[in-house]
Image (spheres, rainbow, N blue to C red):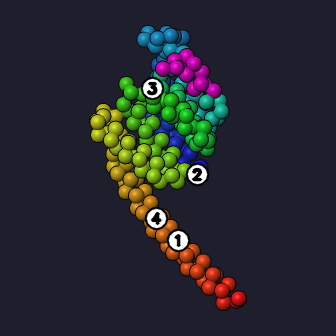
Amino acid sequence: MPKLRVVLLAAMLVTSGMGALCGPAFGADAERRDPNGKTGISPYAEALHRGDVAAGRRSFDEAILQYQQAVKLNPSNPAALYRIGQAQVAAGHLDQAQPFYEHALALADSQPTLKAKILFVLADMQERRRDLARAITAWKGYAEYLKGHQAAHGYPKTAEERIARLTKAQELLEQYAKVRERIKTRLDLAEQSAKESAK
């Protein structure tokens, strides 16, 4: 699990655009601020940056607070909501991450790359919960979205692989369930026969 958290954290920082946020706007020209983020850095971007820095230190509670501040500053931008979900997952709180991802997804229609990322993590969460049917459906949804949005730069091969593996796992579970049912039936019959013989 620790390795997974490190991978998630690295992915969050790389995909979040932190590199862009760490450019000149956060260096010598940090005083150039603009609420709209056109002639200088916006308070929203500053809050995201503070959250990214905290997440980089694995201070996930602090990161979430900063991302929540960003949400207050710009509720219609899904980036901070997505980052809250990432921080929650990195902290091991899958259930708490879900609503933030879903809210971000509802706002991400104009940002295909971000929307693809959200669909990816939602599918991954279903898989981690071992809900095979929902995970397969979610991966199929991710794959379908990528087909219609080439600019999203997603991972269609990953979706194909996960669908194939999960489908196989689901088939095996169904086979095992039938075997268990046959065993149970035989045991019940044997028990009933033993009771009748004892009379």
**Residue 108 place in picture, x, y as percent:** 42, 28
The earlier-in-sequence mark between 4 and 3 is: 3
Q: Residue at x 58, y 80 (%)?
A: 189
Which numbered tag is attached to residue 181? 1
Q: Residue furthest right?
A: 199
Which residue position is annotated with label 4? 174
Identify the image quadrant of residue 49: top right
**Which quadrant does the C terminus fall into?**
bottom right
Q: Residue at x 45, y 45 (%)?
A: 123
SS majority, magenta: helix
Q: Amino acid at mark 1?
A: Glu
**Residue 3 place in picture, x, y as percent:** 55, 50
Q: Residue 172 versus residue 19: which sits nearer the camera?
A: 172
Q: Amino acid at mark 2?
A: Met
Which residue position is annotated with label 2? 1
Q: Residue at x 45, y 52 (%)?
A: 133
Which residue position is annotated with label 3? 107
Picture layout, residue 14 above or below residue 197: above
The answer to if 74 sits in the magenta stretch is yes
Q: Amino acid at mark 3?
A: Leu
Categorize mark 4 by other alpha carbons within 10 Å: few (<14), some (14-19), many (20+).
few
From the viewer's perspective, is the residue at label 4 or at label 1 nearer?
1
Distance of label 3 from label 2 (alpha carbons): 30 Å
The earlier-in-sequence mark between 2 and 1 is: 2
The answer to if 62 sits in the magenta stretch is no
**Residue 167 place in picture, x, y as percent:** 40, 58
